[in-house]
Amino acid sequence: MRVHEKKLLSQAYGHYGIGAFNVFNAEQVLGVFRGAQKAGYPVIVQITPVARNYIHPELLEGMIAGAAQHFPDVTFSVHLDHGNEQHCLQAIEEGNYSSVMIDASHESFEENVRITKKIVDQAHSKGIWVEAELGVLSGVEDHLKVDDDKALYTDPAQVERFIALTGCDSLAVAIGTSHGAYKFSGGRGLRLDILAAIRNRLAAGYPIVLHGASAVPTDEIVRINQAGGQLKSDAKGTDETELQQAIRLGVCKINIATDMRLIWTRVVREFFRDHPDQFDPVISGKIYMEALEMFVAEKCKMLAMS
């Protein structure tokens, strides 16, 4: 059942986290829905501008609509992730999203406010929620690339003013997570002190979003490299204990993308290493959907244990 993101986040706040999973193809759509059904928890299906360019938005919407019919017990919402002005305005006009994210975090504070306010005005006129970002995450994901030395933690002192000026409905914060597979390679973790300071400046129940929250399990990295990959062995993701602490501090939407890509890479590399005579993508695709189903179910259950 498709519902508005507002309903999902208001129910989750302070109690559990909702996994927001980025999808690019039919295998990922089915894997996410199967995992959500297995766990019995709601999910947010996220689509990035890169996914919209890879497979036409109408095809992505068709896949999601079909999955919703096939899995009627799954409660979900659809969200545009990391859009610029053009991406957000197009998504708002299409009407298939209950929320969009405008990412102007790389701009100055004043320009971030201006761009975000523009999107908020357009989105609210059609009942669509807007997620904005304050602070800059490092790492690489899709079209995003930010070096570590250019990453900025969210300044708690700016949060109240930013929300008041823009009217955004949820806020993605930078507290130590990063995009891509090479998270925390220097041994750092989440800045829960900054998160607590942010939460204390917000109205009760205001949704906080955590991007770059994949776990990047060591065994996935090892298996990928054993099958011919060359990922850095010191890659480390977000610790589950810290993630659960963050949920208790107001984070209720948790973005997951890298882990889904790592599972795909491991499945495909191992399959064709072990079956070099095969060339049918359906076989490895089925294995990936099964692995993704298990991952999504386990992730949803973990996020509910906060």
Image (spheres, rainbow, N blue to C red):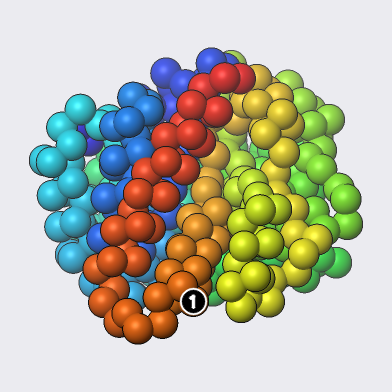
- Residue 36 visible from this viewpoint: yes
Residue at screen point 15% across, 32% down: 72
For the residue labelled by badge 1, is the local secondary structure a helix, a strand or a loop? helix
Where is mark 1, residue-wise? 273
Q: Which image quarter: residue 92?
A: bottom left
Q: Position of residue 224 (x, y in %)?
A: 60, 67
Relative to 282, 274 lies left or right:
right
Q: For the residue carrying disc 1, how many other residues have a C-alpha within 10 Å: few (<14), some (14-19), or many (20+)?
A: some
**In this picture, residue 297 sits left or right of residue 93:** right
Establish if 119 lies above or below 278. above
Task: Name the image quarter holding the C terminus.
Answer: top right
Query: What is the quadrant of the N terminus in the image?
Result: top left
When the figure is inspected, residue 274 is found, relative to residue 264, above or below; the finding is: below
Of the pair 209 and 286, the residue shown nearer to us? 286
Residue 205 visible at all: no
Task: Determine the residue positioned at 18% across, 64% down.
Answer: 58
The image quadrant of residue 283 is: bottom left
Q: Position of residue 147 (x, y in %)?
A: 77, 70
Number of numbered tags placed on the structure image: 1
For image coordinates 59% across by 73% down, the residue present is 227
Residue 231 place in picture, x, y as percent: 69, 71
Q: Amino acid at mark 1?
A: Arg
Q: Is 79 left or right of 209, judged from the image as shown?
A: left
- The residue that appears at 37% across and 28% down in the rendered structure is 39
Closer to us: 53 or 217: 217
> 41 or 127, which lies in front?
41
Q: Position of residue 118 (x, y in %)?
A: 44, 55
